[in-house]
Amino acid sequence: MFDVLIIGAGVSGVSCALVLGSAKERPYALGKKIGIIAHQKASSLQTAVFNNAYGIPAGKLGSELLEESLTHLSTTYPHVEQIEKEKVISIEDHKTFYKITTNKNVYESKIVVVAIGAGNPMTIEGLEDFVEPHQKVPAVKNRIQLKNNDHFR
């Protein structure tokens, strides 16, 4: 049983894993089991090329950044379990935990962080009722977001 399982290993997912990983000695995180499902195939960074991004050398490929970020995570915070080459198929709410089914395994977690980006279509069964058109992107772009309270409006 995971305490936190992060779905998605793009910028948001890995950032979340790094923050949680760095807290391992804090009282609120002591002894917590953290995992990340690192299926990066759909990340918008896969085809990106960076030329004018602060701190990133010109010509750096997004696919390289994705790979380097997971290496950094495993080197710096080896206690964060990386689950690679698995795609989430469904999430079920069991009231005291969530059951996450991938194309290869079934996991249980007390908390699930969905960090999969705004691309459409949403293909994780169990989240359909929580998906809506993205509120800050023109409709023609066909982007989605999970329903939430935007505290910056």
Image (cartoon, rainbow, N blue to C red):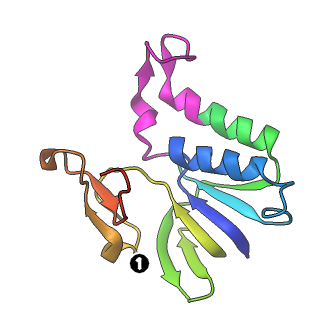
* The quadrant where residue 112 appears: bottom right
Q: Nearer the viewer, residue 129 or 99?
A: 129
- The N terminus - image quarter: bottom right
To which residue does mark 1 refer? 126
The image shows residue 122 at horizontal and vertical percentages of 33, 62
**Whether residue 104 can be seen here:** no
Which residue: 72% across, 41% down?
73
Stretch in magenta: 41-66
35 sits left or right of 55 in the view = right
**How many marks on residues?**
1
59 within the magenta span? yes
Q: Is residue 31 above or below residue 14?
A: below
**Whether residue 129 can be seen here:** yes
Which residue: 38% across, 56% down?
151
142 sits left or right of 148 in the view = left
Q: Is residue 93 above or below residue 15?
A: below
The image shows residue 41 at horizontal and vertical percentages of 47, 46
Which residue: 53% across, 53% down?
8
* The quadrant where residue 107 appears: bottom right
Q: Secondary structure at mark 1?
A: loop
Q: Amino acid at mark 1?
A: Gly
Residue that lies at the very extreme toward the bottom in this rendered image: 95
36 within the magenta span? no
The image shows residue 27 at horizontal and vertical percentages of 84, 62
